[in-house]
Image (cartoon, rainbow, N blue to C red):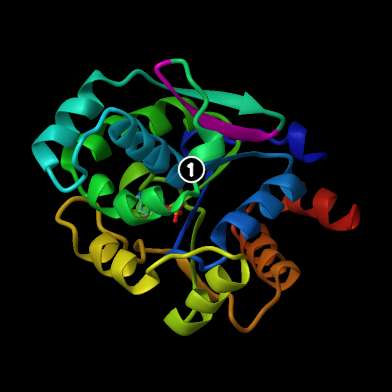
Amino acid sequence: MAAAESHPTPETSVIAIDGPAASGKSTVARALASRLGYRFLNSGDLYRAMTWHCLHHGVDCQDSGAVASAAGQARVEIGCDGADYYPLIDGGDPRAHLRSEAINSCVSPVSAVPAVRYILSAAIRAHAQGRRTVVEGRDIGSAVFPETPYKFYIDAPPQVRQRRRRNQGQVEEIARRDLIDSTRSTDPLTVAPGATVIDSSTLDIQGVVAAMLDKLAGQGLGCAIAACSSNG
Ligand code: DC
C-alpha cells in the first residue's frame, strides 16, 4: 500500500521530532516527511515568526508582559507551500526574515513566554491534528502531541552543533539558546517519554532517516515504510 493509502488515526498521524538547535532535526524531518508522503511543519519557524512580529512592533523581547500582549494581538495562521507548512502573521509572510541575527538572539526569550507557547501550541495542534504531518520542535512529543506513539529526539554534542551553524555562515550562540530552551518553566526542551534518541553526529542524514524508518516500521507504520523503502 502506498503512503497516501495508509489510514492513520488522528492520534497517530503526527510524527514528533524534537531536539536542540542545530541538531539536524529540520533536515531529517523534511527528508522523513518526503519519504513518507507526509507534510512538514517546522514549529521553530512559528516561534521565529512571533519574534519577528515583536521586533517589527518595537517590543522589547526581554519584557515578557509586552511580548505576551503583542502575541495576543497577532493573527497567527499556517500556510502551505508544496509539502511545507509555514507561518503567516497578520496575513504577512515573514519567511525571508526568520534567520536574521536579531531573531536568533531574541527567539529563545520570546519562546519562554507562556502566552506565546499557548497561542502557538494551539495553532500547531489545530493545523496538524489528523493530518499526516512530521512536526519538529522542542516540545512536540512532550507537550504538543504527547499522545502520538511516533517520537524522536535528535541530538549532537554542543561543539558539533556550533560548528554546523558556523559552516552555514550563521552567527548563533547555541549554548545560550540551549540553556534558555531547556530551563524555561513552560514546556522546556526535554526528551519526551517514549522518544527514540538518535545522535546525528555519528550518522549522515540518510543514516538518521533510515534509523527512523526502521523504528516506525517496527511500530506498525509498516505499509507506508515498505512502499517508501522500495522507492529508495
Ligand atoms: O528550531 P529553531 O532553532 O528554529 O527554533 C527557534 C527557537 O524556537 C528555539 O530556540 C526555541 C523555540 N521553539 C520552541 O520553544 N518550541 C518549539 N516547539 C520550537 C521552537
Q: Which residue is mark 1?
A: 98
**Quadrant of residue 56 in the image?**
top left
Determine whether, in the image, residue 21 is placed left or right of residue 55: right
Mark 1, secondary structure of its residue: loop
Q: Which residue does the image show at 41% across and 33% down from the upper left?
A: 124
Q: Indicate the quadrant containing the C terminus: top left, top right, bottom left or bottom right.
A: bottom right
Position in image of residue 214 (x %, y %): 68, 66
**Quadrant of residue 184 in the image?**
bottom left
**Quadrant of residue 57 in the image?**
top left
Q: Is residue 69 above or below residue 113?
A: above
**Residue 199 seen in render:** yes
Q: Main secondary structure of the magenta part?
A: strand
Position in image of residue 176 (x %, y %): 29, 69
Determine whether, in the image, residue 95 is placed left or right of residue 177: right
Q: Is residue 87 magenta?
A: yes
Determine whether, in the image, residue 38 is placed left or right of residue 56: right
Foreground pick, 76 / 67: 67
Local crowd size for mark 1, using a 10 Å CA cut-off: few (<14), some (14–19), many (≥20): many
Q: Which residue does the image show at 24% across and 63% down from the upper left?
A: 180
Position in image of residue 200 (x %, y %): 58, 75
Q: Is residue 125 above or below residue 75?
A: below
Kind of residue at badge 1: Leu
Q: Which residue does the image show at 63% across and 53% down from the upper left?
A: 220
Position in image of residue 102 (x %, y %): 37, 50
Q: Indicate the quadrant containing the N terminus: top left, top right, bottom left or bottom right.
A: top right
Q: Is residue 119 above or below residue 181?
A: above
Q: Seen from this angle, which residue lies furthest right?
A: 231
Give the magenta-colored segment's residue range.
Answer: 83-90
**Residue 9 seen in render:** no
Determine whether, in the image, residue 40 is placed left or right of residue 18: right
Ligand 1 contact, mark 1 (Cβ < 8 Å): yes
